[in-house]
Structure formats: C-alpha cells, structure tokens
Image (cartoon, grey):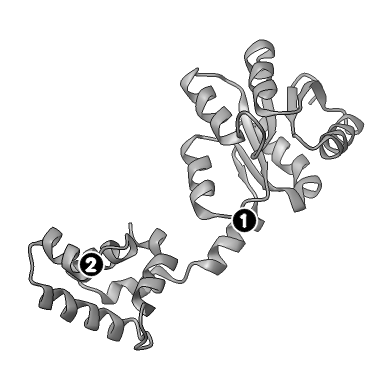
Amino acid sequence: METTTIITADDHPLLLKGLNDFLLERGYNIIGSGKNGREAYNLIVNKNPNIAILDIQMPFMSGIEIAQKCKTDCSETKIILITLHKEREIYEQAKELNIFGYILKEFALEEIETCLDNVINGEHYFSPNIATNLNKKNPDTSILSVLTPSEKKILKLIAKDKTNKEIASLLFISYRTVEKHRSNIIHKLDLEQKTNSLLIWAKQNQANLN
C-alpha cells in the first residue's frame, strides 16, 4: 500500500481535501493532487503514478478525456473515476477505456478502500451501486425475443427518431409495411395506443436494442 503511488484530482477543494485526508490517514501514498483535469493529466505524465483517482467532471479535461489520452499514450497509470453520473453511456464508455475503478461520489468514502485494494491487485472495481441503478432502469431484454428481426430493425430506427417514410426508404419497404410493423410491435410489447408511446419505449430501451 505504501509503495503504491497515487495522485488525486477534483475541482472541489473541500472534497479533494477530504479524500486526501481519508487516504493519508489509512497509509496510502499520495504523491500529488490536481484542482482540474489539466493539472491531473500533467501529474500523470510527470509523476507516472500507479493509480490516479479522478473526479469525472473537471475544468479543461474530464476524467473520461484524461483516460482516453492515457490510453493513447499507453500510460500504465490505472484510472479510478469518482462520479455523480449514473448514465449507462458513461458507464459503458469507462469500461471500453479499461478504467479500473468507477464509483459514485455518494458512496466514495465507503467504497474507495475496497476499490483501491482491487485495483492494486490488478482487478477492476465498478461500484455495485451503479450496476443496481442501471438494472432498475433497464427491463429484462428477453421481452425483445418476441420481436422478429425486421421489427427489431424498425425499433432501432424509431429510437433514432426516423419517420415511417425514412424507415421505409432505408429498409426498401413500403410505408404501409412500416405502419403494419409498428402496429405489431406495439401489440407485442403491450404498449398503450397513444401517440409516441412506441418512440418513448424505444428511447428508454435503446441500450438493449444494439
């Protein structure tokens, strides 16, 4: 733990001090702290820490942007992001960038030691609180199994705000065929016969349509 070098960064001074004090009290080796994304990135480049604990939203560079640059630079620093964001897109982006830790600010002091223990051992730690939150927002994907491949294609296009006319043109089918498919999808998904009910459902479940 003492030999593992760590830098921290947060644009909120009190939060940064609180995190640093918490880690120092527990014997972690903090070798630098930044007040914005640019300072954080420069610390990573100049000090080459084992771990960087970064707020995801900072001036000049976000935690995600820093992680992207570190990946491009082939940096060996393992990134841990602390975030208020619970969106699936950012969560998935973090995984794609091989970010080692991803925890919510509201649980940061509860989870940071567990996260660090995992990361120090070369393992990833994504807060179970985030996974629970995402699962609440996303229904069982098995509901999509009732749809035909053609209906799924149309649903994807609906989620992208395509009109019936545009869908017909893109899929080389008639306008009436698109309308028939829409009607079948609404029936299979047991949606209310309201204007935009299918569009709203498609938007809410877009992540499951890929």
Towards the viewer: 121 or 162: 162
Query: Under tag 1, what secondary structure?
Result: helix
Q: Amino acid at mark 2?
A: Ile
10 Å neighbourhood of mark 2: few (<14), some, or many (≥20)? Answer: many
The picture quadrant where one finds residue 22 is: top right
- Mark number for residue 41? none
Instruction: Tell me, yes or no, whether the two marked residues, 2 and 1, touch with CB atoms within 8 Å.
Output: no
- Mark number for residue 130? 1
| Residue that badge 2 annotates | 154
The picture quadrant where one finds residue 178 is: bottom left
Apparent side of residue 67 relative to residue 16 in the rendered image (left or right) = left
Residue located 32% across and 71% down the image? 144
Q: Amino acid at mark 1?
A: Ile
Query: Relative to 126, does residue 208 appear above or below in the rendering?
Result: below
Query: Under tag 2, what secondary structure?
Result: helix
Question: Mark 2 or 1 closer to N-term?
Answer: 1
Q: Where in the figure is residue 20, as x and y percent of width and height?
A: 85, 32
Apparent side of residue 175 relative to residue 159 in the rendered image (left or right) = left
Apparent side of residue 169 relative to residue 190 in the rendered image (left or right) = left
Towards the viewer: 142 or 47: 47
Query: Relative to 69, does residue 161 appear above or below in the rendering?
Result: below
10 Å neighbourhood of mark 1: few (<14), some, or many (≥20)? Answer: some
Q: Quadrant of the N terminus?
A: top right
Q: Residue furthest top?
A: 46
Q: Where in the figure is residue 103, as x and y percent of width and height?
A: 67, 46
Towards the viewer: 184 or 123: 184
Alpha carbon distance from label 2 to label 1: 30 Å
The picture quadrant where one finds residue 18 is: top right
